[in-house]
Amino acid sequence: MGQSEKQRILDYFPISDIEIKIWDISNLIRLSDKYSQSTINSISELSESIFRNTVSQSLKRSPDEWKGKRDEYISRLRQSYKDDGLVLFLGSGISRDVGIPVWMI
């Protein structure tokens, strides 16, 4: 992401008392390299927390609630696709097969 694109985003949020930082992939790579062990631990802990929360929330829903949520998500995905606003994000499980390094060391 170029500096002009970052500035355009910052200009969209004219809040003077809050500092907004935009990190692009090069910033994230530098941070990951500098704090590699912390990055691995944080990603692992975050993944585990998200998984536990998702399972916990799912168990609290009745089958009808779950089906309603599913239908809502499918409808929103379908609309995003029609609006050309859908971005496919694939994790390391997919990219590993084409030789892109995984986070685990």
Image (tube, rainbow, N blue to C red):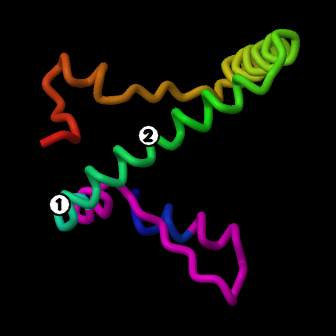
Tell me the magenta residue range: 8-31
Mark 2 or mark 1, whichever is nearer to me:
2
Q: Secondary structure at mark 2?
A: helix
Q: Image height check: is 69 above or below 32?
A: above
Percent position of residue 83, x then y:
72, 24
Residue 10 is a magenta residue: yes
Residue 42 numbered mark, or none: none
Mark pair 2, 1: CA separation: 20 Å
**Camera-side residue of 1 and 103:** 103
Q: Residue at x 53, y 39 (%)?
A: 50
Quadrant hosting residue 92: top left
Quadrant hosting residue 58: top right
| Quadrant in which the C terminus is drawn | top left
Q: Residue at x 81, y 10 (%)?
A: 63
Answer with mark 2 or mark 1, whichever residue precedes in sequence.
1
Residue at numbered disc 1 = 33
Q: Residue at x 79, y 16 (%)?
A: 66
Q: Image height check: is 27 above or below 90?
A: below
| Quadrant in which the N terminus is drawn | bottom left
Residue at numbered disc 2 = 47
Name the residue type under label 2. Ser
**Camera-side residue of 77 and 47:** 47
Q: Image height check: is 30 above or below 43?
A: below
**Camera-side residue of 63 and 92:** 63
Percent position of residue 27, x then y:
31, 63
